[in-house]
Amino acid sequence: MADVAISVDGVSKRFIINPHRRTSLKERVVRGSSKADRQEFWALRDVSFSVPRGVTLGLVGSNGSGKSTALKVISGIYRPTSGSVRVNGRLSALLELGAGFHGELTGRENIDLNASILGLSPREIAQVSDKIVEFADIGDFIDAPVKVYSSGMFVRLGFAVAVNVKPDVLVVDEVIAVGDERFQRKCFDHLFEMRRNGATIVVVSHALSLMEDVCDEVVWLDSGQVQARGDSRAVVREYLADINAGEAAKEGESLNDSGRRGSGEIRVTDVTWSVDDGPFERASVVAGQRVTFRIEYEAIRDLENAVFGLGFVNESGISVAGPNSGATRNWSVQRGRGSVHFTVDRLLLQPSEFGISAAIVDRAHVFDYVDRAYQFRVRSSGSDEPGLVQMPGTWELVPAGERMHR
Amino acid sequence: MSRTLRDDSARTGPGSKTPWAYRFLILNFARRDLKARFKGTALGWLWALAVPITTVIIYSVVFSLVFRAQPPPMGNGDTGHYAVWLLVALVPWGFFLNAMNLAPVTLLASGPLIQKVFIPAYVPAVASSIAVLVQSGIELAVVVLLLLALGNVSWTFLLLPAWIVLFIAFTISLSTTVAIVNVYMRDLAQLVSVVLQLLFFVTPILYPLDLIPQEWNGIPLRAIFALNPLASFIGAERDLLYGLQMPSTAVWLTLLGWTAGSVVVLRWVYRRWGLDVSESI
């Protein structure tokens, strides 16, 4: 059992939801005990998995699927209603950065306090204290009360404490997505380093591509039950497919669903794409390939002037590109079904997950707009440059002597 | 190091680590409470002594000057000083009062933390009582120095540590129990502060127990007053420090009984409710 860091065995967690919970003596006396109208909610049902030492495990699932409850049960904050959880080694939970900070105390005093919350002895605290101060990198503020900290400084110090206490098991809720870019990078570098040093990490995040990159294994929770577990890519893909299927089903049953607006004289019925002149489907694309997008539509009357557009929105919600037909031509569209093609000779998007929005408009009038209805995945072509888009260009080394002549 | 959580057995539950394993954390919390309390005040720690000193002055003036209460003579045979006699009892009372009032508040204030990190529910409660203890310890040291200066010393002083251990264990168990139950019944703390007010006057602090009639309308009044655990604890301390008498074996057994009883109640309450505090706080 020495190589198992966490074992979760048949864990169920029940919450009692009581609309008229008696939280005061008076209510108990006056209205009596209230067992009658209480309702049960099972946040986890018979969940089992184990995490080998040194493995990074991700938990995915929609909101309310039990991810956070699972983290809290692993961290010992909640007691399972049945089943058992076993954690070998020191566990550090990062469910909220700086949860144990006290506003009146200085950063340094809070380091001592927080480190002891995470289970360090005074001697161990003395050993890591300087490292934490250095990692947090907040200068002289370390000796000021944390109530005067900016939220960024607060988070830095919280993260610095949590990762520098050398946990054997680190439990991370979606808290890393805070702080400035530089600090985020530092956090990730540190997580990777901890992973290399054999720490076991359990992480919850909605950023699925991140989960695929960071995690070795993923457990997919749905309504408190394990839906799938195993290799991160496989499980994330399965989960995504399920989400898309669910959304497609929703679109089928209601024409006026959320994320869709417009007057409806003409509607987008499908968006597919063909890679290097292959079949039209929704396959993933490698950066640099030739891609033809097909927007299928159905018009209920003839239209004088229709402009077709596509929007590429990445996971952070940034609209990376928005090509539309308005710049080149005005189309009049006949009543009935039809399609429009948009061809990109070389796709210059960097690897990421995009949501494709499609729109049909006439100047300011919107016939139809579907928001991020189609998942578009750009895979890496091998050379990984940072950024959202590729920037083709030519590099040239200019010898020092030549610069004078220019 | 390994931790197992289980529903069916509290022995392997989050409480599988003994309170001893959390001693550093408890001390750190206590330190936090103390630092936070006096930070930003001009006189800092001196405030810790301000309340007991004013209390003694007020009660001494009212009772020895206005009501002309006669304090019992000191253990060394000298005439009694009402203020000294009162002070000896006020220090443990102050500890009990503040511990009972602060523990529920401190536990509730730790709610956000308890929902995010695993900490046994008794840690903040015990820590707040320990922070109070530091203050009361200083007061007690002042009292002992005062008695030394008055020449009221005897070997009974040597038994004081035993009394202190029992009284601390009794008080902290009780305050922590109230703090945990208060999470589920939020007005318990209010009820307790009302009871404490009453308790101050039915406990022989301002007056000696002898002043209570043996019998009143057929009711054995003094025996009833003596049932109060604080009457036993404070009476014993007064014997040790002021009267310089060895409390009887029966008294010691009573103190031991109250202490053991309150520890057992705390254990039961913690296992019954304390492990799920994070859900209700």
Image: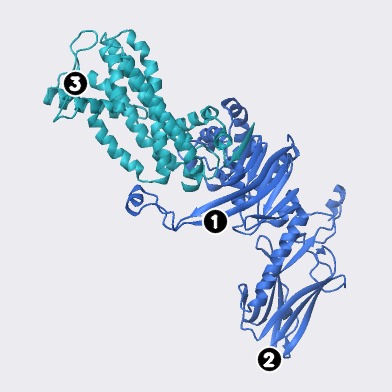
Chain colours: A blue, B cyan
Which chain does the numbered disc 2 sit on? A
Q: Which residue is mark 1?
A: A41
- Name which residue lies at 64% across and 31% down: B1
Q: Which residue is mark 2?
A: A301
Give neighbour class at mark 3: few <14, some 14-19, many 20+ (Cα, 10 Å): few
Badge 2 amino acid = Arg
Residue A289: x and y in percent read 85, 66
The span from disc 1 to disc 3 (Cα, nearest Å) is 59 Å
Residue A111 quadrant: top right
Identified by mark 3, the residue type is Asp
Distance between the alpha carbons at the discs numbered 2 and 1? 50 Å
Q: Are marks 1 and 3 on the same chain?
A: no
Give the answer, above or below, for where A355 lies relative to A257. Answer: above
* Residue B219 % position (x, y): 18, 30
Left or right of B3, for residue B38:
left
Q: Amino acid at mark 1?
A: Phe
Q: Report in which chain the residue with disc 1 lies.
A: A
Residue at horizontal 79 percent and vertical 54 percent from the top: A385
Residue B192 percent location from the top left of the image: 32, 39
Q: Is residue A43 left or right of residue A9?
A: left
- Residue matched to label 3: B210
Crowd class of label 2 (few under 14; some 14 to 19; many from 20; radius 10 Å): few
| Element on which disc 2 rests | loop
Q: Is residue B40 visible?
A: yes
SS for dot 1: strand
